[in-house]
Image (cartoon, rainbow, N blue to C red):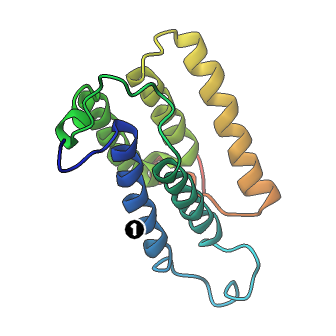
Amino acid sequence: MTLLNIHKDRVGAFLFLVFSIAYGIATFNIELMFYAEEEAFTARTLPFALSVGGIVASMAMLILPPVSNSEGKDFSFSGALKGLEWKKVGLLAVTMILYGLTIKIIGFILSTMIFLMAGFWILGERRVKYLVLISVPLVLAFWAIMTKLLEVYLAPGSLFYFLGVVK
């Protein structure tokens, strides 16, 4: 009998719960324009909804029993961390950091396309045709929803201002 009897899925769920709570708290630091404070949909709405969704999903994973068969498995804390793909996690984290650094320079559309293609590549998709056919329409549809339907301004990126493409 181990002191910490934990399943591998529960470690991930706990880490996701901590991240979702921290993300939810951070949403209150998002500054709002003076005219947007009374609006129903603000810059805080979607991040807060994502935080709540993450908290609900991770709590469900923590409370509900594990799906896999548990006979003969190591449920210690170190056993739960064995076999996880830390290299992919690290590469995805670096990709997210690079995405955050490039979005102001090359804009939402290009940086998000590159981010999605890199993420899919890291997760194992090697067919370039699928990378493009999934990333490009998804980003363009999301951009259209954000800018045209919700009227959220997404800056094109400082590189395009520098090159004179956008004035």
Residue at 70% from the left image edge and 30% from the top image edge: 137
On the image, the x and y values in percent for residue 151 come to: 76, 63
Residue at 60% from the left image edge and 58% from the top image edge: 53
Quarter of the view holding residue 71: top left
In the image, is residue 3 above or below residue 127? below
Kindly tell me whether residue 72 is visible in this rendering: yes
The residue singled out by tag 1 in the image is: 22
List the single residue furthest toward the right.
149
Quadrant containing the N terminus is: top left
Q: Amino acid at mark 1?
A: Ala
Q: Nearer the viewer, residue 54 or 79?
A: 79
Q: Secondary structure at mark 1?
A: helix
Kindly tell me whether residue 164 is visible in this rendering: no
- Judge left or right: residue 81 versus residue 109: left
Q: Nearer the viewer, residue 91 or 86?
A: 86
On the image, the x and y values in percent for residue 5 come to: 27, 45
- Judge left or right: residue 149 versus residue 111: right
- Judge left or right: residue 66 versus residue 132: left
On the image, the x and y values in percent for residue 61 come to: 50, 47
Q: Nearer the viewer, residue 105 or 56?
A: 56
